[in-house]
Amino acid sequence: MKKINNPTRNTWSEILKRPTQSFADIEETVKGIFKEIQQKGDVAVQKYTSLFDGSTSVNSLVTKEEMEEANALVSKELKMAIELAKNNIFKFHEAQKSQKIEVETTEGVFCWQEKRPIQKVGLYIPGGSAPLFSTVLMLAIPAKIAGCTEIILCSPPNKQGKINPAILYAANLCGVTKIFKVGGIQAIGAMTFGTETIPQVYKIFGPGNQFVTVAKQVATQFGVGIDMPAGPSELLVYADVTCVPSFVASDLLSQAEHGSDSQVVLVTTNKEVLEAVEKEVYLQLEKLPRKEIAAQAIEKSKLILIENEQLALELINEYAPEHFIICSKNEEFFINGIQNAGSVFIGNFTPESAGDYASGTNHTLPTNGFAKTYSGVNLDSFMKSMTFQKITEKGIQNIGKSIEIMAEAEGLQAHKNAVTLRLNKVN
Ligand SMILES: NC(=O)c1ccc[n+]([C@@H]2O[C@H](COP(=O)([O-])OP(=O)(O)OC[C@H]3O[C@@H](n4cnc5c(N)ncnc54)[C@H](O)[C@@H]3O)[C@@H](O)[C@H]2O)c1
Ligand SMILES: N[C@H](CO)Cc1c[nH]c[nH+]1
Ligand SMILES: [Zn+2]
């Protein structure tokens, strides 16, 4: 872990750079694969599934038999754990439903806003390095609550052409319509353009590695919506003397183990805290089954000692972490001051893993600084707001003159006429 002592502000952006490849590094690869998918459909998808995932299976659609097999393979214990998580995620997202907003802005002028589900959605479930069946819950539950009618799912197969049974079990439990054994850039391309087998969708959701994330960003150039860039996991912890160093270390390692390109950062004003956490990280790392992956992320991670809490807060807002843990006696200061973070975890007994699995909040969150502008997945991600208006004769009399004047001032006579004709009728 790299220790950094009181970095000056002009060094922050360099220190806080993410260890992933840039958009430009990957864009051309994505565009090449997308072009082939547009031209050759399933054949191109199969070619890249074989190249990147080593699966030569021809049929990408998961069959009823495969679903039944998966159901039998998932243990009762795991099914019960999934049930608890599902209930909490459902409760939190169901509560995000909002009411129709209706306002009579001027007498006789009625404006209202209502939400409608996005009809066709595609969910991407990562499966390259770990089968993230928890992500199925995070995406399919709000999609169902929103009322999306076509919910398809893509996830990479293993070399035997199979998807992890827990992913299939969770998908079935949450009402996913169709599941396809396709991952990476080729999955995003297939959902963007549609193939003979995989339907085109209106919006693509879900996290993934840097290839998936860039592919989603490129997909927007072809008219598909995306939730947000949700790439390699990140965690920033602010800790003071009230923290438990072993807890902090366990949180840092929890995100480091996602991938060698994960990024974890500790910020503190206390040298002893910094050293105690560092020691704990290396102690715990030794015992992890995914030690090699986590070690690569830890090697690039940062331990930042900073002068005071105000500066710490400014640095954290500049970094805009996907996950932000606050372990401080001044937690209110950080809660009130945090402007840019995907999801915030407060106190010694709130591990980030709780949000990853079962507390109820969504774990599909913006990375790479996108927390400055994007929200994490929530119920509204699966809906659009539509506005409506109805104007009475009295209403057009009340606002018509203003519209005529404004239209004339913009030089748009036809706009003015649309009002004048009506005013002539009612006056
Ligand atoms: N931000 C979030 O909300 C969030 C949530 C969960 C997971 N994640 C992140 O998701 C990621 C999951 O990554 P993963 O790799 O395990 O699974 P993945 O499913 O995202 O990616 C695997 C796919 O990547 C493609 N691929 C691999 N190497 C390639 C190459 N050289 N060129 C082109 N394509 C290639 C393959 O097609 C493969 O199917 C992790 O980085 C994790 O941190 C983020
Ligand atoms: N931490 C990930 C989001 O960055 C989500 C996840 C799923 N499973 C475990 N973790
Ligand atoms: Zn995680």
Image (cartoon, rainbow, N blue to C red):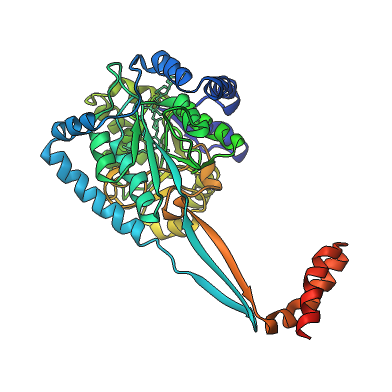
If the image is split into quadrants, where does the N terminus sit? top left
Position above or below: 284 against 392: above
x, y percentage for residue 74? 16, 34
Report if residue 245 is visible in the image. Answer: no
Residue at the (56%, 21%) spot, across then down = 39
Which quadrant contains ligand 1? top left
Residue at the (49%, 57%) spot, across then down = 337
Q: Residue furthest left?
A: 76
Front residue of this view, candidates 68 and 211 = 68
Residue at the (49%, 47%) spot, across then down = 312
Report if residue 235 is visible in the image. Answer: yes
Q: Residue furthest front?
A: 425
If the image is split into quadrants, where does the C terminus sit? bottom right
Which quarter of the figure has residue 26? top right
- Left/right placement of residue 24 relative to residue 1 reads right
x, y percentage for residue 371? 51, 45
Position above or below: 270 against 259: below
Residue at the (32%, 47%) spot, across then down = 355
x, y percentage for residue 174? 28, 46
x, y percentage for residue 384? 51, 55
Front residue of this view, candidates 89 and 205 = 205
Position above or below: 124 against 92: above
Which quarter of the figure has residue 397? bottom right
Front residue of this view, candidates 339 and 126 = 126
